[in-house]
Amino acid sequence: MSKWERYSRQMLFQPIGESGQEKLSKAKVLIVGMGALGTVVANHLTRSGVGHLVFCDRDYVEMSNLQRQTLFDEEDVKDMLPKAVAAEKRLKKINSDIHIEGHVTDVTAGNIGEFMEGTDLVIDGTDNFSTRYLMNDIAFQYGVPFIYGGVVSSRGMGAMFIPGETPCLRCLFPTFDSSGQTCDTIGVLSMAVDIVASQEALMAVQYLTGNRDQIEKSLFTVDVWRNDRFSMGFGSPVEQCPTCGTQEYPSLKASEKDSVTTLCGRETVQIQHSTRYDLAKWANQLEPVSSSVKKTPFLVKAVLQEGETLVLFPDGRTLVQGTEDLARAKTLFTKYIGN
């Protein structure tokens, strides 16, 4: 059997062919976020034969994810598997010929550079603009394209930003004030996710196979329920843009405030501890103050007597679930975990 047998139908498509498939096999792509968008993008790129796929996610699989996060199933929910672990396991079953790395981590200014060596593309699978600005900054610093995508309700949008050829994400959205509309507040249709994520994957394949002239240099928007689609041309890069203009890359400058984050629409606050967690130790320590403690090889989940839930990860992260009040979350963290 030819090494290209599994890609034979894709190679019959003339713009890709054998030369394009060879280029895909040598490419490395970083996906940040393995939720709704990330799972669809990763599935497409794995089946398309991208040679090295790296992805990061800070969360674990919950039942509400299954409606749209296509790599996960009920067994993953039962086992409380981190999304990066569950996705890596599933994708390796789909294509064992490529290199797949899943990392259970929160991508920050302090660690995103670790994933950039040899990377040809950075792809957005997240749900918040602070992380998107971070991806935008690192991609332009390294001179590689950044593919943006976002979906809420029945609406979605996306674009590909190429250093030296197009503006960047920050040029189009210099600031971003949340409207309060998230998947957890007004819902989301999986069909909208599929369309936007498939467009992200398509742009990646077009770029990696050398078909850059086919990439739409605009911001596309779509509403699947209303059957609307619109594209807005980019225009010129902003000279004063701190990313692609003055090259200050503000999101890459880590600060103390970055250690405490409200997760968009999740009633969850994430707190980064200064040291790693020994999960066995913390499971035992939280047992007397919890109505329920569950430990897996990847996390400890403890329901507190106050009603909130703590989820501890080995890398030192704690999710305080059940509140978006930073002060309340810090109080519970200090009470049960310490400074």
Image (cartoon, rainbow, N blue to C red):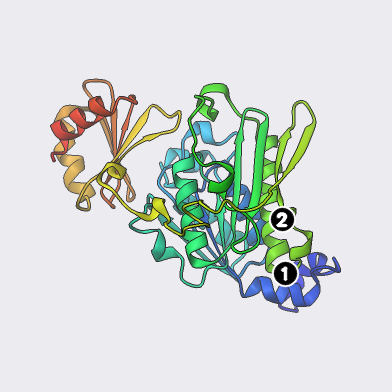
Point out the tag, 1 or 2, that comes first from the N-terminus. 2
For badge 2, the amino acid type reads Leu
The quarter of the rendered structure image containing the N terminus is bottom right
User: Which corner quadrant of the image does residue 153 belong to?
Assistant: top right
Query: What label sits on residue 209 in the rendered view?
Result: 1
In the rendered image, the vertical position of residue 34 relative to residue 112, given as above or below: above
User: Which corner quadrant of the image does residue 231 belong to?
Assistant: top right
Q: Secondary structure at mark 2?
A: helix
Note whether residue 70 is visible: no
User: Which corner quadrant of the image does residue 206 belong to?
Assistant: bottom right
Q: Is 17 situated left or right of 275 in this image?
A: right
Query: Callout 1: 10 Å neighbours few (<14), some, many (20+)?
Result: many
Residue that numbered label 2 is attached to = 202
Compare residues 164 and 236 and report the one nearer the observer: 236
Compare residues 39 and 268 and report the one nearer the observer: 268
Compare residues 11 and 61 and report the one nearer the observer: 11
For badge 1, the amino acid type reads Thr
Q: Secondary structure at mark 1?
A: loop
The quarter of the rendered structure image containing the C terminus is top left
Residue at 78% x, 36% y is 229
Q: Is 182 situated left or right of 21 in this image?
A: left
Compare residues 207 and 282 and report the one nearer the observer: 207
